[in-house]
Amino acid sequence: MKIFHCDHCGQLVFFENVHCLNCNHTLAYLPDRRDVGTLKLADDGLWRCEDPQRLAGTYRLCQNYVAANICNWAVPADDPNPLCRSCRLTRIIPNLSVPGHHDAWYKLELAKRRLLCTLLTLGLPLHTKAEHPQGLAFEFLADPDPPDPTQPPVHTGHAQGVITVNVAEADDAERERRRLALHEPYRTLLGHFRHESAHYYWDRLIAGSRWLEDFRSQFGDEREDYGAALQRHYDRGPPGDWPARFVSAYASSHAWEDWAESWAHYLHMADTLETAAGCGLSLQPRRPNEPRLTARPELAAGRPGDFDKMIADWFALTYLLNNLNRGLGLPDGYPFVLSSPAIEKLRFVHRVVRQ
Ligand SMILES: [Zn+2]
Ligand SMILES: [Zn+2]
Ligand SMILES: [Zn+2]
């Protein structure tokens, strides 16, 4: 994620903010410019950018910004859709009459917007189902409460361009309970969105494409029975040597999951490296064999550039990140170790994204 500033007072502002904390002006993310803008309400009821260089831009606030307080994106005034580019992708929202679901919906949309921002920055195709036959949709579904044995549980997953997320994943305590039960080092809402987006883009970019042969040589044959592979994973656990071949234990369950875990990982890297570069972060160690990081302008502009440089930067950045977390008594922010085969899979994702 890049670094944003208030157009009115220059204060550092965040992707999630709706007001500048210094001057209190209204902020909105402008997806057409991939930037947070400071907006002023004009007499015609439309919002205009404070930055004089952007005067041409007029906007409405997303309906979910105005009416529900769960969004902070704007819609260009000439776009007839009342919902922003992110909210229009959600076709089922949580049942808001259930206590806690408004808060859950906010967290789900927030994580989703961060995913979409990275996808747009990387130049990946992003359409609704109304705009494109291979468009994308999101559904936020909850298990019946009280439990109903006649109804199947809601699985977070992807099928035919629809990403379903179980609303319970937005509950921190419940997500942590699931993380521990599944022996996962990392489980976040954003991670779910990144992972499921991988399945969507596999269908869109890999299936039936010139990448398929290369894909199978690195990730394995995705025609293996998916249901049986997952059952085997949950019954017997991952193979003992998974750390030498996969980015995570779950990646070892099936070629599609290997792809999804690698893709999600690549998006973690792209977003975090962009933020570090945007902040001007560089590392100049006193010893020559310790990780070095040079702020690269192309990273700050959201272009990952050369993969070998990207992975070298990533090692340096995560070394710093984990050390800082330990200083705060927190678990490692990046609880992964990348083996050479896992890095080659990330390189494959990089090539697909670049193309
Ligand atoms: Zn301000
Ligand atoms: Zn919205
Ligand atoms: Zn998956």
Image (cartoon, grey):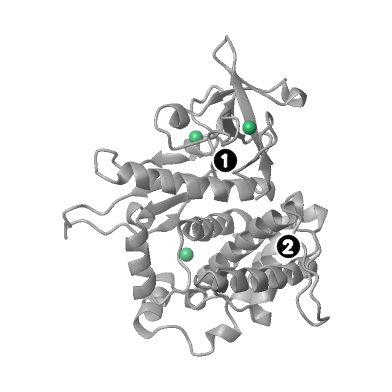
Instruction: Count neighbours of disc 2 (C-alpha within 10 A) and say few if under 14, some if 14 to 19, many if 20 or more.
Output: few
Q: Quadrant of residue 324?
A: bottom right
Which element is circle 1 on?
loop
Question: Which residue is at a point 63% across and 76% down the rendered structure image?
Answer: 342
Relative image position of residue 284 (x, y in whole percent): 80, 70
Question: Which residue is at a point 36% across and 76% down the rendered structure image?
Answer: 231
Question: Which residue is at a point 25% across and 44% down the rendered structure image?
Answer: 99
Relative image position of residue 341 (x, y in whole percent): 66, 80
Q: Which mark is residue 351?
A: 2
**What quarter of the picture does the C terminus occupy?**
bottom right
Q: Depth check: 260 or 4 in front? A: 4
Task: Report which residue position mark 1 lands on.
Answer: 127
Query: Seen in the image, is 66 located left or right of residue 200?
Result: left
Amino acid type indicated by mark 2: Arg
Question: Which residue is at a point 45% across and 83% down the rendered structure image?
Answer: 238
Q: Depth check: 198 or 96 in front? A: 96
Relative image position of residue 20 (x, y in whole percent): 58, 34
Query: Seen in the image, is 158 located left or right of residue 204?
Result: left
When the figure is inspected, residue 275 is found, relative to residue 333, above or below; the finding is: above
Q: Is residue 117 visible?
A: yes
Which element is circle 2 on?
helix
When the figure is inspected, residue 146 is found, relative to residue 238, above or below; the finding is: above
How many dots with numbers?
2
| Mark nearer the N terminus (1 vs 2) | 1
Query: Seen in the image, is 159 located left or right of residue 118?
Result: left
Q: Dividing the image into four equal quarters, which quarter contains ligand 1?
A: top right
Q: Residue furthest top?
A: 43
Q: Depth check: 37 or 23 in front? A: 23
Amino acid type indicated by mark 1: His
Q: Is residue 206 visible?
A: no
Q: Residue furthest bottom?
A: 240
Relative image position of residue 165 (x, y in whole percent): 39, 53
